[in-house]
Amino acid sequence: MSRLPATARREQILDVALDVFASSGFHGASMNDIAEAAGVTKPVLYQHFDSKRDLYKALLDEVGHRLLDSIAKATAEATDGKSQTHLGFRAYFRWVAVDNAGFRLLFGSGTSNDDEFTVSVAKITASAAEATAPLIAADISESSRHTLAHALVGMAEGASRRLVELGDDFDPDQIADEVSTLAWAGLRAL
Amino acid sequence: MSRLPATARREQILDVALDVFASSGFHGASMNDIAEAAGVTKPVLYQHFDSKRDLYKALLDEVGHRLLDSIAKATAEATDGKSQTHLGFRAYFRWVAVDNAGFRLLFGSGTSNDDEFTVSVAKITASAAEATAPLIAADISESSRHTLAHALVGMAEGASRRLVELGDDFDPDQIADEVSTLAWAGLRAL
DNA sequence: GGACATTGTTACTCAATGGTAACCGGCGAG
DNA sequence: CTCGCCGGTTACCATTGAGTAACAATGTCC
């Protein structure tokens, strides 16, 4: 019906597809569903994306970058570990609160068991862990340090998953305070 | 070919299906795949399970109980919070090491976005969090306490996911030591 | 005002796969 | 021996959904 310039249509499709995929998962959402939600027909999707996988992957990457960027920006200013931890978690939970569908897409267990997709998500959490690892000053093996870093990232994910499942609104800054207190105390103890 | 008594066949199917589902995810694995892996044909599966969903659900429940039982047994003896924490994590990581496919089934993001399945898994992590919540003695709202409990459960999941993705063997007791140290220190700080 | 490009639609193909109806064969009981 | 139960197979149906070919409409530039 209403025609849109190519780039705008592409953006809109990404927007809409994010919601649909986040709600129904990769397999639960059909290309027809997405097209309909965008007020358009299937072939239009294929004018902008080679395949369903391609569209999904584009979303994973975009959303992942949004998350990592906001964390990076937030922690850039901080100098000491404690405020890095605090600001990092705050950025994470703020992102969850704002980009709710994004969180469900990445961590809501709708991502199929596809190797390529799993790897994409793994890279994102690995990046977050990479940034966390230096905060662990303990005298342990590099491997253990990374495992613990993943544990800390898992804290944010675990807390967020529950908050998102509850569906209620929540105050990201308050959650961040509590979780980062817990995390930082743990870090100092090692 | 080789005939088996019904109960034995049922067990074998569950066994085989766990591996197949864990590797390929719910949608990635076809009933034919599972049948073939069990050395049998499709209709046999339907003699023991009403549907693919039914089979998958049976697995989720069984594996979930295996996890929760081992944690419950391990922590039952402990009296103080610190050793409860420690033993709980140890049971978790030992379970991951032993029941590797089970971990991938529950937490490996192959569980589709199906409501029923998601709820099943959510119930399991919620149970674990339920057991963790009393360890948090801080003066915070009940809701915050539960969110933090989920954060702690997320620690175990996050660390495990990395370990499983790496593929190498790992010493569950050593990981448990490190993670529980981190967690317990955090708990005391609240 | 007509030609070209861009955007979009209708209507289809084709493969995968969940699920089923009908049939087979061996083994134990009477 | 044969009858019937039990575990198993072959061969099929029906649906769903990704992806495409061919066609229509909407500008916009000279």
Image: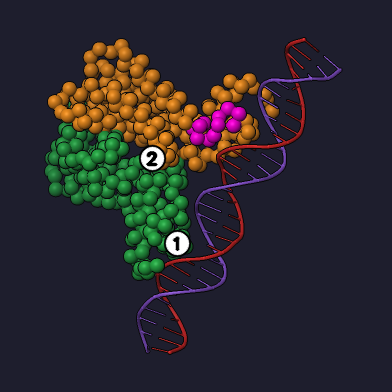
Chain colours: A green, B orange, C red, D purple
Whether residue A66 appears in this view of the structure is yes
Asked which quadrant contains residue A136, the reply is: top left
Q: Residue at x 34, y 60 (%)?
A: A12
Tell whether B137 sits left or right of B132. Answer: left
Q: Residue at x 23, y 17 (%)?
A: B81
**What residue is disc 1 on?**
A41
For the residues labelled 2 and 1, the Cα–Cα distance comes to 28 Å
- Is residue A59 a member of the stretch shown in magenta? no
Q: Residue at x 20, y 31 (%)?
A: B144
Which quarter of the rendering shows the N terminus of chain A?
bottom left
Q: Earlier in the sequence, mark 2 or mark 1?
A: 1
Which amino acid type is marked by label 1? Answer: Thr
Which amino acid type is marked by label 2? Answer: Ser
Tell whether B138 sits left or right of B77. Answer: left
| Of residues B190 and B9, the one drawn nearer to the viewer in this rendering | B9
| Of residues B22 and A46, the one drawn nearer to the viewer in this rendering | A46
Q: How many numbered discs, if any? A: 2
Q: Secondary structure at mark 1?
A: loop
Would you call the spot at circle 2 few (<14 residues within 10 Å), some (14-19), or many (20 or more)? many
- Is residue B50 a member of the stretch shown in magenta? yes
**What residue is disc 2 on?**
A109
Magenta stretch, residue numbers: B46-56
Q: Residue at x 27, y 23 (%)?
A: B132
From the image, give the main secondary structure of the stretch colored magenta: helix
Residue B28 pos. (x, y %):
50, 42
Residue C7 pos. (x, y %):
40, 69
Q: Secondary structure at mark 2?
A: loop
